[in-house]
Image (cartoon, helix red, strand yellow):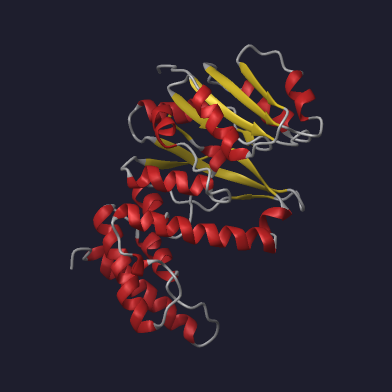
Amino acid sequence: MNMPLVSILMPAYNSERFIGEAIDSILNQSYTNFELIIFDDGSSDGTRKVIESYNDSRIVKVLSDKNYGVVKARNEMIDRAKGKYIALMDADDIADPTRLETQIEVLEAGDCDICGSAQWVLDETSTRIKKSKDKFTDADLRALLSVYCGLCNSTITGKAEIFKRFKYDTTILTSEDYFLWVQMAAAGFRFINLKDRLITYRRYPAQTSAVHLEKFKLTTAEVQRKYLKLLGIPEKFLPQQQGWSTRLSNGVGLLKALNQRFSGISFKANCEIYARFQYRRNGFWTPLTRLERYCVAAWVGLFPNA
């Protein structure tokens, strides 16, 4: 296998507790031709001390005395990246030793432009580890971007030229990665999630707090509107809970548009998308709601141009 240079981008802010483990997981990769760019974004704890304790020549240290925020930090690292590929890595996650080797092999084979993977999800409160729930094909991943982001940031490795073309939007601060993938997907770049679990991703209570979820909900809806616009799909098809007759029109309309754009969307993905138009009820209506979802997904999958 060819071994092109890979630029790994690791933004860090007050990451003293975990960044050493994250750095070690990169330095211990089976794939060795990389540069690890670490951006200390004005940390007030011992993060910088940990970073400075490493002397590996492959590490590029960017030390800021001011906190600019993760979006600006990532964009600056993209500008500095010299590799053919860019790999994203958060300062509190852990990479499997074969992560880069596995992903670069897929990218070099020309199977995709952006390569993610499944993950282990580590709950910092309970310390429990569970498997992520993922979609893997390009068609499913790009279609499902209309309702949620199915890509984990720390698993992503992709062509550097694409990252340098798009970068992160500085006006979208809660779902900046989501919007990045939306732009790439609408431009026609191909995605894959590998079934190998190549990252251990840490989850924190703050990520499920009411304040965070409310901000995320607002920016998610904004990104979804932008995605439909980029795809040339009418905004009336924006996925949201609707009455039966309205959702049958708009939900089917969105599914048709997506299935015409992305050939090969799975039945399960079509179900997930249409479900966003339905009200979530328990009891008597649940079987009927589920049956409606299955029928619509099957029909659109079989006759996307009808």
Residue 9: image x %, image y %?
57, 29
Find residue 306 and report its horizontal and vertical position in percent: 18, 68
Q: Identify which residue is drawn at 51% across, 27% down.
A: 100
Q: Residue furthest left?
A: 306
User: Residue 83, relative to residue 177: is it above or below?
Assistant: above
Q: Nearer the viewer, residue 254 or 217?
A: 217
Where is 147 relative to 69, above or below? below
Q: Is residue 64 left or right of residue 197?
A: right
Front residue of 170 and 204: 170
Which residue: 57% across, 44% down? 119
State the image coordinates of residue 80 (x, y, percent, origin top left): 52, 22
Asked if residue 28 lies left or right of residue 44, the reply is: left
Query: Can residue 151 be seen in this snapshot?
Result: no
x 60%, y 15%: residue: 58
The image quarter in which residue 77 lies: top right
Residue 257 or 79: which is nearer the viewer?
Answer: 79
